[in-house]
Amino acid sequence: MTEPTHEKSHGGALGTRLNWLRAAVLGANDGIVSTAGLVVGVAGATDSRSTLLTAGLAGLLAGAMSMAAAQYVSVSTQRDSERAALALERRELRERPEAELRELTGMLQQRGLSRAVAEEAAKQLTARDALRAHAHMELGIDPYELTDPWHAAWASFLSFTAGALLPLLAIVLPPAGWRLGVTVLSVLAALALTGWSSARLGAARPGRAVVRNVCGGALAMAVTHAAGTLLGEVGV
């Protein structure tokens, strides 16, 4: 009788892992695009390796900290909401257990169980862990595995940093004449990979995602390089 919950638990865990992987890929993608746009723009104005390194590091740290702070705030707000919902569920289970049992039975019926089977399953789930059963069915969360905002912040910081390191190293390591070409090719290849990965994690066809990602990154680099070149020519 507990099989539906067992399946949902595994599905929820898989969904959580996929969300984390998708967030990591998107964080790396943001790091690639934003840092590439910055260093390519600066490269349009100067070929000084120290200036490029300084600008790239500043962009990397600012972007990574911004991503981490945003994730921390967002996940903290989500966690506060989940805790409030769980507190309400606990109170309802304590104050009106029979009504909650009927509610759980109705939700199981909506999933295709007959009334008799749903009633028996609801009783067994309630006896085993009433809060977890209701949290899964009503809220779609596991009350014992809430997302940690610090984990989300560090994951965003690290994924953005990993993505940003590619254009930064590509612009400062090669000889001056090779920098722009190496950076552009490296960034476009990386964007193709992140576009493909994000599409596959979302069970979508990767072709359009790759094209969108590559075209968006190419446009960003073209615009910033043109702006940097213009500013360099006028001596700003």
Image: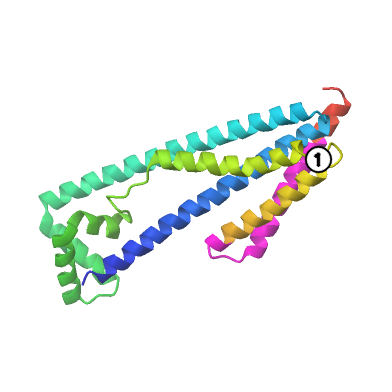
Residue 186 position, x and y percent, is 73, 49
The residue where tag 1 is placed is 179
How packed mark 1 is, by other alpha carbons closer than 10 Å (few <14, some 14-19, many 20 or more), is many
Q: Position of residue 46 (x, y in %)?
A: 82, 29
Identify the residue at image location x=85%, y=31%: 230
Circle 1 SS class: helix
Say which residue appears at 22% left-offset and 67% top-offset: 106
In this rendering, the answer to whether 101 lies above or below 219 is below
Where residue 159 appears, as percent x and y from the top left, is 55, 44
| Kind of residue at disc 1 | Arg
What secondary structure prevails in the magenta region? Answer: helix
Taking the magenta stretch, the answer to whether it contains residue 109 is no
Quadrant of the snapshot with the N terminus: bottom left
- Pinpoint residue 228: horizontal percent, then vertical percent: 80, 32
Q: Image quarter for residue 170?
A: top right
- Is 206 included in the stretch rendered in magenta? yes
Quarter in which the C terminus is drawn: top right
